Image (tube, rainbow, N blue to C red):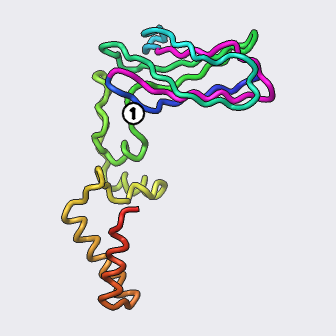
Amino acid sequence: MPLSLELRLVERRSDSLVVAVSLIPSGSSRVEGVALELHGPREQGVGARVLLPIAGALLAPIHTQAELSLPDDPPPGLTVVATAWCGDEEVAASCPADPCIGLDTHLRGCPCALPPRDAAMLDVLTDAERDRLAEHFPWLSLPVVIDGDQESGEAEDADDELADLCDQLGLDDESADWLKELLAEDL
């Protein structure tokens, strides 16, 4: 294959999508053109096809971003499809266009995205199931901080943990205050 085509959703806005397109040649490749298009759940085209201004000899990787307009009432299950033409060959890549959540957000049960209207509801994990998963995914045990805010109970726990640490290290009050200020600073 003379070319590798990669596509990634960068941002989903209320009326448009921003996608990143990467063309990576293997050696020297000649590109005739690159197009982006939204496809519905049944692989039909939704909206206009966008042609990117990329054509000619490709000697090094090219990375660009493009914005695609969303239809007024976008159906769930949209996919962005990129197609690059290299002589007689056609290279395609796709990525989902729906708002999605990461595995950590999903497993922690954060309500960051609404499920599609016809999606099945997920079962809530029991404590034993969470513990089994935490053996393989240690980040599940980490506390969840939403938008950088901490509840007062979490702040008190952090103060207690800091006091315990200072006792273990044998720090005097002045050094303990200095450590507390240092840990409170934004990086």
Residue 142 appears at what percent x and percent y?
A: 37, 59
Quarter of the rendering occupied by the N terminus: top right
Local secondary structure at mark 1: loop
Please report the residue visible at 29 percent of the width from the left and 50 percent of the height from the top. Answer: 147
- For residue 179, which quarter of the picture? bottom left
Q: Does the magenta stretch include residue 184?
A: no
Q: Is residue 30 magenta?
A: yes
94 vs 97, left or right, is right
90 vs 17, left or right, is right
* The one of 92 and 138 positioned closer to us in this rendering: 92
From the image, give the main secondary structure of the stretch colored magenta: strand
Res. 48 in view: yes
Please report the residue visible at 36 percent of the width from the left and 71 percent of the height from the top. Answer: 183
Can you identify the residue that label 1 sits on?
Answer: 100
Query: In this rendering, is residue 92 above or below 145?
Result: above
120 vs 169, left or right, is left
For label 1, count other residues whose C-alpha is less than 10 Å away and answer few (under 14), some (14-19) or many (20+).
some
The kind of residue tagged 1 is Cys
Q: What stretch is highlighted in magenta?
A: 15-38
* The one of 32 and 95 positioned closer to us in this rendering: 32
